[in-house]
Image: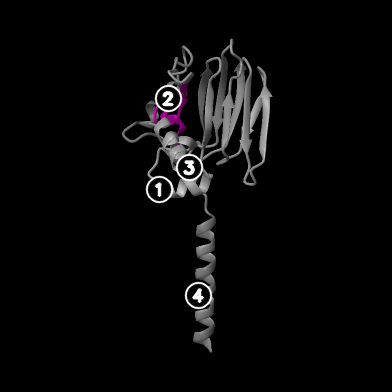
Amino acid sequence: LQKKNMAKSLALLTTFALLSLTTVRASDPDLVSDFSVPDGVDPAKLDGVFFTYTGLRGGAPASTNGIGYKSVTIKDFPALNGMGISMELLKFAPGAVNVPHTHPRGAEVLFVVDGSLTVGTVDGNGKLYKNMLQKGDVFVFPKGLPHYQANFDKTNKAVTVSAYGSSIADYVDLPKNLFGSSIPDEVLTKAFKMSADTIQQLRTAQN
């Protein structure tokens, strides 16, 4: 009887362990110190320069797709390591569109510095939440949800600053991720109810 009860207890513990593993979401690890010091660096020699990033001076560069950006992540700013945050400066040329995409590791808070911007995000039920933002407005994109930004003004640029709830939030371009991948045409034609020719056109557009 004791062995049976022990077996049942082990089975329950295993089940709970597996359930907890399946619900874990990837996130930045918590620090066990005030901040993270890069390997080989003497903490005693650090000063305010370590916590300063100057890479945004001069603004975002021009881009062939109409969206110039400069990211601030731990790749270029080691002081962010373990902080669970990052940011990005974006400049939208007139008519530029940031295609539907996701940030799998962090939510995004967008602040419009200049111009106006149309934004939208879609929840798990397919409902679209969109708005037209003006200078000074803020919009939040929940972690992992598809979203977009578009500067429909044909004359003026728009400038934004985004903050992310991860030191590397990542960027998944949904059109490229789907139609630029090796997913079989048979799967995509059924998923999107499109002809094989249309799928090929979409694939070509991503290359």
Please tell me whether mark 2 or mark 3 is closer to you in this view: 3
Specify start and end residues of the magenta stretch as a single range.
69-81
Say whether marks 2 and 3 touch (CB < 8 Å).
no
Q: Disc 3 marks which residue?
A: 195
Q: Residue furthest bottom?
A: 1
User: Extreme top residue here?
Assistant: 155
Question: Whole-Å distance between the Cαs marked 2 and 4?
Answer: 49 Å
**How far apart are labels 1 and 4 at the CA level?**
42 Å
Q: Give the position of the C terminus as an image quadrant.
A: top left
Secondary structure type for disc 4: helix
- Mark 1: which amino acid? Pro
Q: Secondary structure at mark 1?
A: loop
Residue hosting label 4? 10
For this rendering, which residue is in front, 130 or 200? 200
Q: Residue at x 47, y 21 (%)?
A: 69
Residue appearing at x 51%, y 64% in the figure: 17
